[in-house]
Every structure is written in structure tokens, then in C-alpha cells.
Image: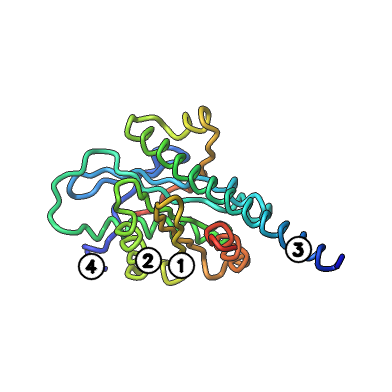
Amino acid sequence: MDSNLQPYRRLRINDLTYRFTTDNGDSYKCFFLSFAEYFADYPELAPKFYSFNLELVNKPAKHKGIDKRIGATAVKIVGDFLNSEINAVVYVCDPSDGKGLTRARKFKSWFKYYEHSSHQILQVTSDIKIENLMLYTVLLVHKKNKLKKQFIDAYLDLTDEDK
Amino acid sequence: MSSISNKTRASIRSKKNRKNKSVTKSEMILKMLADQKIIREAIQKGISLKELEKTHGFKFATLPSVKDK
């Protein structure tokens, strides 16, 4: 594999958190927050819904171009999480700084581009407009997950304004 | 007449249900964003996820051990 596409080595700093540091010195924490409360109408699925969070811990270093290894690492982490074929992951792009759309495009491109297990993962996107705020979200579920259709229906039910 | 009246009532009920559901969805989405903000700010302050579980009732997935080389 091209070394530019090699995921960073991640550390499991406790039961709930992975951490990795980029060549630029940026440090990220990754974890999965339960989204069960948002899918209360789907008791069988609710405990299997998680959001993926990727948080930069330090102030960003001065970057020289795009670091593709960050995407490769995120895909590896989410891919491994979904490989159990049990859970589904929702990624909510933070809109607070007006960069929600940029984040959504980047996140979606990661899963189109990188190999690993991403070819096994189904992506469904849904944009929600709430109070003049555009929120970009992505559902990720393993193609072999037996409940994938139900996951997609539940996700679209939450994000579809007209339903 | 009665039939029309019942239909009308059903239509209003349906619209009310839709509206209620829509409001609930908006509230849920806004809560989702608020929770994400709490978590993001807590991480910046160095607060652990276990602490957040205790203080805010969040639940996080237990992660498998890393097999990266």
C-alpha cells in the first residue's frame, strides 16, 4: 500500500477511546457515542446505532497539503467497528463553524476512496434542514449486516423532514 | 355527512400527528447537536468519556483492542 494511504497507528487509551497522532503532530481522539435515544421507535435497532466522533485534541498544526492518512485511519476504525455486522454508524457533520458541507464531502470521499473494508460498507446520506441550519449526515452499515434495510429505514425516518 | 366529518377529523388528526412528529424530530436533532458540542468542549478540556458518562448520562461503545501493526 502507498505509504500516503497507510493508516496511522492508533492507541486504545481506554475502553472507550482510540487516539492517533499525525506526522504534523495533530492528535485525534476517536470514539462511538450511542445514538439509541434517537431511535426509540426501533427498540431492536436502537442499541446498535452509534455516531462516529473524530475530535482534534490540540490546536491544528500548520499543514502542508492534505493528509490522506487521516481519512485512511478513520476508515480503518469505522470499518473495524462495522465488521462485526451488528452495529450501524451515523456521522453528523459539525455545522457550527459553517464547514458542515466540507466535512460531509470529505467524509463521504474517504469511504469511496480507501480500500480496507470500505468496499463492504454501504453509505446512505441525508441532509436535514432545521431552523435555517443545514445538517449533513451519513449512515454507514456493513453490506452483510442482516438488519441493513431496517437500519436504513430507521435512519431515513429520523432524517426525512416530510415523513 | 358523518363520513365526511370523520374524514376531516382523521385528516386533522393525521396532520397533528405529522406536526408533532416533525417537532419531535427537530428537537431530537437539536439535542444531538447540543450533545456533540458538550462532548467536543469536554474533550478540549481534557475531560474523559467515562466522566461524561457519569455526569451527562452519555453512553459510548466499548472498543475492541487494536491489532494494528
Q: Do the residues bearing badges 3 and 4 touch, measured as CB atoms within 8 Å?
A: no
Query: Same chain, marks 4 and 1?
Result: yes
Q: Could you tell whether B3 is left or right of A51 in the image? A: right
Q: Mark 2 lies on which chain?
A: A
Q: Which of labels 3 and 1 is toward the front?
A: 3
The residue to which callout 3 is attached is: B8
Residue at 35% across, 60% down: A104
Secondary element at tag 1 = strand
Q: Earlier in the sequence, mark 4 or mark 2?
A: 4
Measured as percent of width and height from the top left, residue A95 is found at 35, 50
Q: Which mark is residue A123?
A: 1
- Numbered disc 3: secondary structure: helix
Q: How far, Cα to Cα, is label 2 from label 3?
A: 48 Å
Count of labels in the image: 4
Residue plotted at (48% across, 61% down): A139
Mark identifier at residue A111: 2
Asked whether the beta carbons under mark 3 and mark 1 sit within 8 Å of each other, the answer is no
Quick check: marks 2 and 3 in contact, CB under 8 Å?
A: no
Look at label 3 and name its amino acid: Thr
